[in-house]
Image (tube, rainbow, N blue to C red):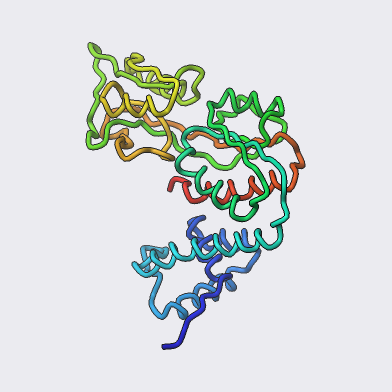
Amino acid sequence: MRRITFDLDCLRTFSTGMELGSFSKAAVRLGRSTSAVSAQLKKLEQQAVTPIFVKSGRGLALTEAGETMLAYARRLLDLNDEAVTAIQGSELEGWVRLGLQEDFGETVLPKVLGQFARAHPKVRIEARVARNAELIERITAGRLDLALAWSDGSVTTPHHERVMDVPMCWVGPAGEPRAWQATADEPLPLASLEAPCLLRTAATDALDRAHIPWRLSFVSPSLAGLWAATVAGLGVTIRTPIGLPATVQQLVPVVSGLPPLPSLGLVLHRAQAQPDPATARLATIMLQALQDVRPD
């Protein structure tokens, strides 16, 4: 049986196009013409010896083989990029102080730390999980080198990069899409983190605009406490789709009777405009990892 070696450039084009939802956007990001991208996708399908795309309306959808191909493409590209970094930057040394929200503690942090440690074993990382206000205070005071924080645009730092906009969503216990219905006699019970909290403010503003009465039924200093209260049925809460545990679920506004919510900015703050090589490399790995948890 003839061995097949997939072309990594084709895999990168394929992965980028699926990430962006458009191969024309992938062509722009990768600096290629649309015809070159089309040729790469055709080559990839020929190498796979099976269709990886199927017509879906005016666009393309992945076949079952295509879904499998995408999962392996991401793994192969991650390993390739990690190998390049290990070879070219293995002598990086130093200390990087990273801060981020609790939402990313289980979804992004393990992958980032693992990938970085394998490529740069001589660099020590000090990670701190904290609330927005503390992260901004520490990055401003120079006690963190990088900080990943939510943003409504009202607070910025001198050196920040808006990574993406993430939709906020109502959250209730898993399996109960109609867990709460607000009435004039019984205000909506709301579980929240302690103030100040950007998401709490967004929730109460949305409820007020919709003329839905509410009350704070549970206030927690931590995200773990918030999830416990939500699962216990003490109230609905508001977060983003990132990092939701299996014990809770997003509540669809049309079904639950709750008002729609806006998006929230995700920002990467840097203590310095030109960070040292170790900090710059960690920031790159962080941004790559965030693409894997980006909500659809």
274 vs 279, nearest the viewer: 279
Marks counted in the figure total 0
Instruction: Depth check: give the residue in front, 36 or 292.
Output: 292
Q: Quadrant of the N terminus?
A: bottom left
Position of 221 with respect to 81 (left or right) is left
Residue at far bottom of view: 1
In the displayed structure image, the side of residue 151 where residue 61 appears, left or right: left
Quarter where residue 84 is shown: bottom right
Which residue is painted at 48% across and 33% down in the image? 102
Residue 110, relative to residue 77: is it above or below? above
Q: Position of residue 210 (x, y in %)?
A: 36, 21
38 versus 122 height, above or below? below
In this view, the residue in front, 36 or 217, is: 217
State the residue at coordinates (24%, 14%): 186
Residue 259, quarter of picture: top left
Q: Answer above or below: position of 80 versus 278.
A: below
Residue 13 x, y percent position in the rendering: 55, 66
Q: Quadrant of residue 260?
A: top left
Image coordinates of residue 195 in percent, x first then y, are 48, 17
**Residue 189's spot in the image, x, y percent?**
30, 18
Q: Is residue 12 left or right of residue 236?
A: right
Residue name at image x 75 percent, y 44 percent: 276
- Furthest toward the front, the residue is 122
